Each structure stands twice: as C-alpha cells, then as structure tokens.
C-alpha cells in the first residue's frame, strides 16, 4: 500500500517536471503557422534568418518583422541566425522586434557580451553542436555570458548546423544538463515520436523543434505540432 502511494507520488512529480518543459516551435515561414503554434500551446516562436548553411526555412528580415508584429502579447519571439557580425545582428534584432536571440554560428563570448551591452533587454541563447563528448568542455566558456544554451546536431555529410533532422547522443546532452549552471534547451532531430523519450533521458529546460513539425508541403503541420507539445509536456496520449 505504502509502496503504491510512493510510486504514485513519483509519477506525479515526473509529470509536473514534464509540464514545465518549455517548447519552441522554430522555422515559421508564415504568420498563420506561428499563430497556430501559439494556440496549440507553444511557449516560443522561432524565426530563422541567415545566409550561411542555406536552409529552406530561412526568411528575410522583412518577412520576420511582418510575422513578429502580428503575434500576440506574452509570446516569446526568438530570432535564430548563424550570422556572426555583431552590428548586423543587433540591427536585425531591432528591426524585427524580438526579445530573444539564438546564435548558431561561431559567435564568441565577447560577441555575446557586446550584444547584451547594447541591448540589455535581450536574452541570448548560444548553440552548442554535439559531435562527441569534447563538446562538454567547449561549451563551458558560454555558461557565464549566455542566458541559455541550445544543444543541436551537426550533419557532417552536408556541413549543416541546425535543422538537420538528426538526433545526437542524448547521454552527452544529459551530462551537460547536469554540469552546466544555465538552462539547457534540447534540439536536433526531435519529433512527436521521440520527444517524450528525449525529455525523459535529458531532462532539459526546454525543447526546440523545426523539421519534426513540418508537413509534406514544407510548412507546419498542426497535428504534429499539437502532438509534439503534448508529449513534450508529458500528457498521456
């Protein structure tokens, strides 16, 4: 009897932890997709702007601004970019009107300090591409300057970073969650089919998805978004 009560309490605690997982739906190319994701429970909306590592999900700064301006209050809007020029990045942040910046290129800790000095309201997330366990030490230099770190995959075959649709070693990601004193966001190949297990193994602050919520037309699929969010947050389905 007592064992059953303890088991139930543990399960309740696990479910509570899952429900607190933040979900970012990235790669939005249309305002209707972003609004749909918000209505389905997304905590953050990601807009991809860049030049390097060409992606079908890149949009122009003008398109990103148009989407951002049509989103409701209390929605976290994230500019994700691999552009590293500090002045260009600051200009994009101001022009589009976002409150969070996600850097996927080779930006340095000094770059982040410079950006945050000019834009003190801005939250900055730095990407760390998980290749092997040497990445654990590599990323530590960003812990004191970034507001969060996103763990993403790297595709050696295409030299593509982010949006690869490939998962990486989640055991390494879990070690980073345990060692870093900063919120960790898990990305890379997440789908409605594997996100529940990813959250169980890694225990991240949040999860970030793009290709896993696409439909065959290359735009967002409402049913996949809904299923992803529910499973990430631990709803029994």
Image (tube, helix red, strand yellow):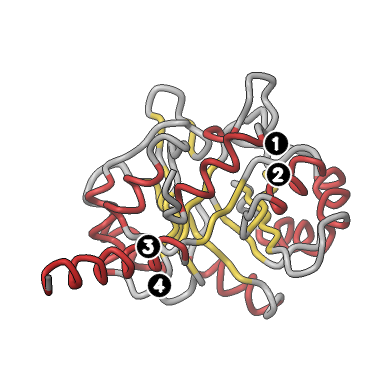
Q: Which residue is mark 1?
A: 58
Q: Nearer the viewer, residue 54 or 216?
A: 216
Characterize the local packing of mark 1: few (<14), some (14-19) or many (20 or more) Cα atoms within 10 angstroms. Answer: many
Residue under circle 4?
182
Q: CA distance from mark 2 to mark 4?
A: 25 Å
Front one among 42 and 116:
42
Query: Mark 2 touching mark 1, by CB under 8 A?
Result: yes
| Position of residue 9 in the picture relative to residue 97 (left or right) | left
Residue drawn at x 72%, y 52% is 39
For residue 49, which numbered disc appears in the image? 2
Real-space Cα distance between discs 3 and 4?
22 Å
Q: Are marks 1 and 3 in contact (CB under 8 Å)?
A: no
Q: Residue at x 54, y 49 (%)?
A: 229
Q: Nearer the viewer, mark 1 or mark 3?
A: 3
Quadrant position of residue 115: bottom right
> In screen coordinates, is 37 left or right of 228?
right
CB of mark 4 within 8 Å of CB of mark 1?
no
Please name the residue that numbered disc 3 is placed on. 15
Secondary structure under the numbered disc 3 in the rendered image: helix
Q: Note whether residue 105 is visible.
A: no
């Amino acid at each position: 009897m007592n064992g059953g009560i303890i088991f139930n309490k543990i399960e309740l605690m696990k479910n509570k932890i899952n429900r607190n997982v933040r979900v970012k739906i990235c790669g939005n190319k249309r305002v209707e997709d972003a609004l749909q994701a918000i209505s389905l429970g997304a905590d953050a909306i990601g807009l991809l702007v860049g030049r390097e590592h060409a992606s079908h999900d890149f949009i122009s700064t003008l398109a990103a601004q148009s989407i951002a301006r049509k989103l409701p209050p209390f929605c976290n809007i994230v500019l994700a970019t691999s552009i590293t020029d500090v002045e260009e990045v600051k200009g994009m942040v101001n022009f589009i009107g976002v409150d969070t910046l996600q850097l996927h290129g080779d930006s340095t800790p000094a770059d982040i300090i410079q950006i945050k000095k000019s834009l003190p309201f801005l939250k900055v997330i730095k990407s760390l591409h998980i290749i092997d366990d040497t990445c654990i030490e590599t990323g530590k230099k960003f812990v004191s300057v970034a507001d969060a770190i996103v763990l993403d995959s790297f595709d050696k075959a295409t030299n593509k970073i982010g949006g690869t649709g490939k998962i990486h070693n989640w055991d390494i990601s879990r070690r980073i969650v345990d060692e870093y004193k900063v919120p960790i966001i898990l990305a890379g190949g997440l789908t409605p089919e594997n996100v529940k297990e990813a959250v169980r193994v890694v225990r991240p602050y949040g999860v970030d998805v793009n290709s896993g919520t696409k439909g065959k037309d290359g735009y967002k699929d409402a049913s996949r978004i809904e299923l992803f969010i529910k499973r990430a947050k631990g709803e029994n389905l």
